[in-house]
Amino acid sequence: MRIADFALERYFARWEFAVEYLLCASDVEGYPVADLLDLADDEARGLWRDLRLGYTESTGHPLLRTEIASLYEGIDPDEVLVFAGAEEAIFCLVNVILGPGDHSVVTWPGYQSLYEVGRAAGADVTLHELREADGWCLDVDRLVASLRPDTRLVVVNAPHNPTGMLPTHAEWAKLTQELAGRRIHLLADEVYRLLEFDQADRLTAGADAYPRGISLGVMSKSFAMAGLRIGWLASHDRELLARCAAFKDYTTICASAPSEILAIIGLRARDRVLARSREIVGANMVRLDAFFAKHGDRFAWVRPRAGSIGFPRLLDDTPIDRFAAELVEAEGVLLLPGSEFGYPGNHFRIGFGRENMAAALARLEAFIASSRRNGG
């Protein structure tokens, strides 16, 4: 396989651990291990105490698959496959479904592997562009019009990275009904699911929507446990999951034993874990609302509906790549230019899941004030 460099991950490899403030992080502030262990029930505490560092079941610990299945309305534990993070799940699934002569439609801008893996597998990939002028909304009619007889997979990331887009219930029902009628698989990238600002907006999970729907989940985002590297696929299509499991034999084979036990603890305590994430995100959204109201002459801002990230636009003539580079140099604050998604213009990703965001915004404000004084 020959695959293009992953621009966003190369950018973070350079900057993520070299800056003081990561104002473009996609995740929520990492959950402290000691606090997580305090949430363990007696069974999970025993699993952790008696853990031996051997191989785990390739499909995932049975108790972990049971907890993951409980996140959905009608998924059984045998309809869950555990991976070493969402990235591995994407890589295996797309390689199993797509090959030369196949077609896929993927929402964009977006996480590069959602479309680049398909291209590397030999498939023709159509990018379904979300547009700021439309409030970043999913245009179901335009997406459906791009489907072809050889379309095998549609990928929709919702809640969306980087815009915070979330389709309405009506839009989601229309799309899933169209795909079900055409027998096309849907990969619903739901890594920000459960971080909706209004819980009434939460969509039916892809895995629950129709038999060929597939849900992608992970402990990294809403659950604030990126360091566990635990992701999963859930679907009623057991034959597809079996093919993914066979492909996984060539990647990680199985997940980390300690990570699986910690994920079990986190999922069993999900109410406490998610309440913490929502509290951090909610408080930071208040700060962002005030920031963008104050600097409306400098930034355009479509408020996200879910998740912990948004996609503002710098309004002046300074290229966003230059603005971001100067901000890092002057204040140690990192933004993610839209160019790292291959997206033109002056957009950038801002993350609001970290506990030090108030300090990061203060540094950004200081930079803006300084640039104004200097005529920038």
Image (cartoon, rainbow, N blue to C red):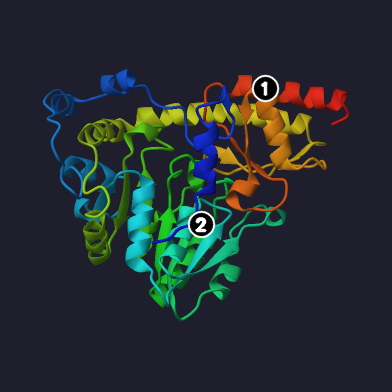
Visible residue check, residue 211: no
Secondary element at tag 2: helix
x and y, in percent, of residue 253 in the image: 21, 49
Q: Earlier in the sequence, mark 2 or mark 1?
A: 2
Measuring 12% from the left and 30% from the top, which residue is drawn there?
A: 52
x and y, in percent, of residue 266 in the image: 30, 31
Q: Nearer the viewer, residue 132 or 98?
A: 98
Amino acid on which disc 2 is placed: His
Is the residue marked by circle 1 packed among few (<14), some (14-19), or many (20+) residues within 10 Å?
some
Is 224 on the left-hand or right-hand side of 302?
left
Amino acid on which disc 1 is placed: Glu
Measuring 50% from the left and 78% from the top, which residue is drawn there?
A: 148
Quadrant of the frame with the N terminus: bottom left
Is 363 on the left-hand or right-hand side of 59?
right
Is the residue marked by circle 2 packed among few (<14), some (14-19), or many (20+) residues within 10 Å?
some
Q: Is residue 358 above or below residue 241?
A: above
Secondary element at tag 1: helix
Q: Is residue 324 above or below residue 233?
A: above
- How many labels were placed on the picture? 2
Q: CA distance from mark 2 to mark 1?
A: 42 Å
Residue indicated by mark 2: 169
The disc at residue 331 is 1
Q: Is residue 41 above or below residue 324?
A: above
The disc at residue 124 is none
Is 206 on the left-hand or right-hand side of 51?
right
